Image (cartoon, rainbow, N blue to C red):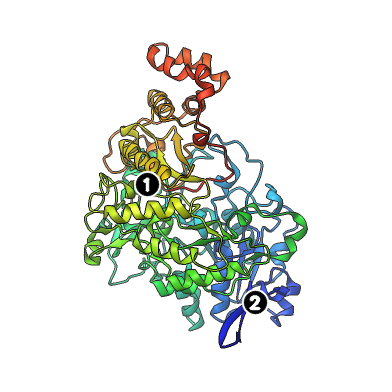
């Protein structure tokens, strides 16, 4: 969105100017020529539609390249099944092709936890599901390498990031090597791409040849057997079990994971080396967490904040509709949940934007023509981690813990919610904002004094009051995920007893404020360590609490998580103890079925599977008689998209 500021009566006002086609990055040859560009420096191929907004990776990368004074064009959702003209439309870029599958792994985007094809794609106009291939990064990169064998290809985005070394691919049910191998790409960037990309662009601009870029932090490359592994005196190496060894021995694959996770989340990490046949994959250590000014700079780039106009006739882009009035305040998550990929991709250290940058974005949103005064989310991967960090950085610099809050909250972690109270109030006081909601899930455990023992109870309660009073639009999302302590331990989540404490506090404040806010708990079935009995207990315990669950999901083993390693190998990657996981389709369906104890078609089944637990059957099936008493304020309606915390 273009916003002009001009002086009126000694003050400054802003107005919205309808963007022109040249305000978007070019996606056609005609648009490239209109900018006066005969060729491009970088061509970016993406599996998502081009939405020029900081929540969309391709836009961030494109705008960053533009800000470096380079010429960038985007090929969004190219047709990979015709004569491949989309891939040729800009010709050969001067520096390299950048390839991303989009904001999601293409397989997670395409398939449900039960490997059923999804009916829509949130990142495509009209939700059309047919605009990207399976394993999009590999498909795009292979095509580019066939057409332009001498132009380097750099992979980025979550799909490449989480598939950087040997990983389990749930959809083909096998171990796959680093995506570099299958895609024939020359380099991959893992994690959030701004810092490594800037380093690459600046080195290339200085005249360093692409082949010499072998020690850029946060990148991965393949070294063929005839070449020596590059040296960097300040890095130490850790060698993983080779891909071939992992194929032969699941325990070795499991052992690898601990190193991958630890080195991805350390201030001074080691370089990771892994052999694949005669080649060697080298994963350089990550950049330090982005500073406030670095992350501000990324969010402050001149986005139009809109989808490219070519999509107008093809329908709305669901992912854009969901976030167009929302503000992402920070990146990273220190929760380290076993099933979640956020810390593997964004890191466990939080990079927070300044208040000024957040307020600038709020100002921009208020000028959008269809804005009605409601910010849908002041959030982040976990909404209430903004500005949280270690009290003493030198302790964090030595630390290898994958989670700062599991099994208990680290003494060094500053969990003050005051910066969030301040920014919420500031946004709320904006004269063009009616409501500023927090739509992202919150870490409820950080607000439970028994769990967050060193947290300031007064500030926690003030945060809860501010949140419930002003920033919840009827539903507060939290993610206890399970009720079984054993499963929760495996998940790196706190005991369910803390959820009971949280609910008490929630109910108290909700009542005091005279509100009828629904508490929406999320749960996962079939997670490693979850047994059918645990699910039966979960159903009974949540029923006792008055919940009528619908906001639930079955565990999907996405690449590069502790839970996925346990699912495939049968071992916990840290303790190396055996772990039970429901693996076959029927076991998974049965676990999931317990969420829906209240459906008539499940009653006979519940009686049958719980024949040895008559008390539980009685408890679960007492529903019919009690149906009239169901508290609708606690009834959870299905929602299209869940946000994890
Ligand atoms: S020292 Fe504590 S706060 Fe710092 S990274 Fe480690 S667990 Fe997190």
**For the residues carrying marks 2 and 1, which lies nearer the camera in this image?**
2
Q: Report crowding for label 2: few under 14, some 14 to 19, many 20 or more residues within 10 A (C-alpha).
A: few
Q: Measuring from the top left, give residue 143's x and y in whole percent.
A: 64, 58
Indicate which quadrant contains ligand 1: bottom left
Which residue occupies 50% across, 20% down? 626
Contact, mark 2 vs mark 1 (Cβ under 8 Å): no
Task: State the residue in front, 478 or 192.
Answer: 478
Task: State the residue in front, 242 or 483.
Answer: 483
**SS assignment at label 2:** strand
Which residue occupies 31% across, 59% down? 416
Which residue occupies 60% across, 36% down? 116
- Judging by the rendered image, the residue that carries numbered circle 2 is 15
**SS assignment at label 1:** helix
Q: Measuring from the top left, give residue 217's x and y in whole percent.
A: 39, 68
Q: Measuring from the top left, give residue 39's x and y in whole percent.
A: 67, 78
Q: Is residue 550 left or right of residue 40?
A: left
Count numbered badges in the picture. 2
**The N terminus, quarter of image:** bottom right
Task: State the residue in front, 374 or 531.
Answer: 374
- Judging by the rendered image, the residue that carries numbered circle 1 is 444
Most extreme residue toward the right is 313
Task: State the residue in front, 213 or 113.
Answer: 113
Sequence-wise first label, 2 or 1? 2
Q: Report crowding for label 1: few under 14, some 14 to 19, many 20 or more residues within 10 A (C-alpha).
A: many
Q: Measuring from the top left, give residue 165's x and y in whole percent.
A: 42, 53
Residue 507 sits in quarter: top left
Separation of disc 2 and disc 1 at Cα?
Answer: 39 Å
């Amino acid at each position: 969105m273009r916003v002009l500021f001009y002086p009126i009566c000694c003050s400054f006002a802003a107005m919205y100017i309808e963007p022109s086609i040249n305000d978007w990055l070019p996606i056609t040859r005609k648009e490239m020529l209109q900018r006066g560009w005969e060729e491009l420096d970088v061509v970016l191929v993406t599996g998502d539609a081009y939405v020029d907004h900081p929540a969309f990776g391709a836009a961030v990368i494109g705008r960053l390249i533009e800000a470096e004074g380079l010429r960038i064009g985007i090929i969004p959702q190219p047709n990979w099944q015709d004569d491949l003209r989309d891939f040729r439309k800009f010709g050969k870029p001067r520096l390299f092709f950048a390839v991303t599958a989009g904001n999601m792994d293409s397989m997670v985007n395409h398939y449900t936890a039960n490997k059923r094809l999804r009916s829509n794609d949130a990142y495509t106009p009209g939700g059309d599901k047919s605009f990207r291939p399976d394993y999009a990064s590999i498909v795009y990169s292979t095509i580019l390498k066939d057409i332009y064998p001498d132009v380097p290809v750099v992979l980025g985005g979550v799909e490449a990031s989480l598939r950087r070394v040997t990983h389990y691919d749930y959809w083909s049910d096998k171990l796959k090597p680093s995506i570099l191998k299958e895609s024939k790409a020359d380099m991959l960037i893992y994690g959030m791409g701004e810092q490594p990309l800037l380093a690459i662009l600046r080195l290339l601009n200085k005249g360093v040849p692409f082949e010499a870029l072998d020690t850029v932090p946060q990148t991965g490359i393949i070294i063929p057997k005839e070449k020596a592994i590059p040296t960097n005196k300040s890095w130490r190496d850790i060698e993983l079990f080779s891909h071939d060894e992992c194929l032969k021995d699941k325990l070795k694959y499991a052992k690898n994971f601990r190193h991958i996770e630890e080195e991805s989340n350390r201030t001074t990490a080691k370089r990771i080396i892994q052999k694949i046949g005669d080649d060697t994959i080298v994963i350089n250590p990550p950049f330090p967490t982005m500073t406030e000014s670095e992350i501000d700079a990324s969010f402050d780039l001149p986005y139009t904040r809109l989808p490219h106009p070519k999509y107008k006739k093809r329908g709305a882009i669901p992912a854009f509709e969901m976030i167009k009035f929302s503000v992402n305040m920070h990146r990273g998550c220190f929760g380290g949940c076993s099933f979640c990929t956020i810390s593997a991709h964004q890191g466990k250290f939080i990079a927070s934007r300044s208040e000024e940058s957040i307020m600038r974005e709020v100002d921009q949103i208020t000028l959008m023509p269809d804005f009605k005064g409601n910010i849908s989310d002041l959030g982040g991967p976990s909404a209430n981690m903004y500005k949280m960090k270690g009290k003493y950085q030198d302790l964090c610099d030595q630390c290898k813990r994958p989670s700062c809050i599991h099994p208990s909250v680290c003494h060094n972690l500053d969990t003050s919610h005051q910066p969030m109270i301040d920014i919420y109030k500031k946004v709320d006081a904006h004269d063009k904002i009616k409501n500023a909601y927090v739509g992202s899930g919150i870490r409820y455990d950080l607000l439970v004094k028994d769990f967050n023992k060193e947290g300031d109870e007064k500030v926690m309660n003030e945060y809860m009051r501010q949140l419930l009073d002003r920033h919840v639009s009827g539903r507060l999302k939290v993610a206890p995920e399970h009720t079984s302590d054993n499963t929760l331990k495996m998940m790196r989540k706190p005991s369910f007893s803390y959820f009971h404490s949280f609910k008490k506090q929630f109910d108290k404040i909700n009542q005091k404020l005279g509100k009828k806010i629904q508490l929406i708990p999320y749960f996962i079935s079939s997670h490693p360590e979850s047994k059918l009995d645990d699910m039966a207990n979960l159903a009974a315990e949540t029923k006792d609490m008055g919940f009528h669950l619908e906001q639930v999901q079955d565990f999907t083993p996405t690449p590069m998580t502790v839970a996925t390693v346990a699912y495939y190998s049968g071992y916990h990657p840290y303790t190396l103890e055996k772990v039970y996981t429901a693996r076959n389709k029927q076991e998974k369906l049965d676990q999931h079925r317990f969420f829906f104890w209240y459906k008539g078609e499940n009653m006979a089944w519940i009686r049958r599977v719980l024949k040895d637990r008559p008390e539980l059957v009685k408890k679960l099936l007492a529903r019919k008689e009690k149906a009239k008493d169901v508290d609708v304020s606690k009834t959870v309606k299905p929602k299209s998209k869940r946000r994890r915390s």
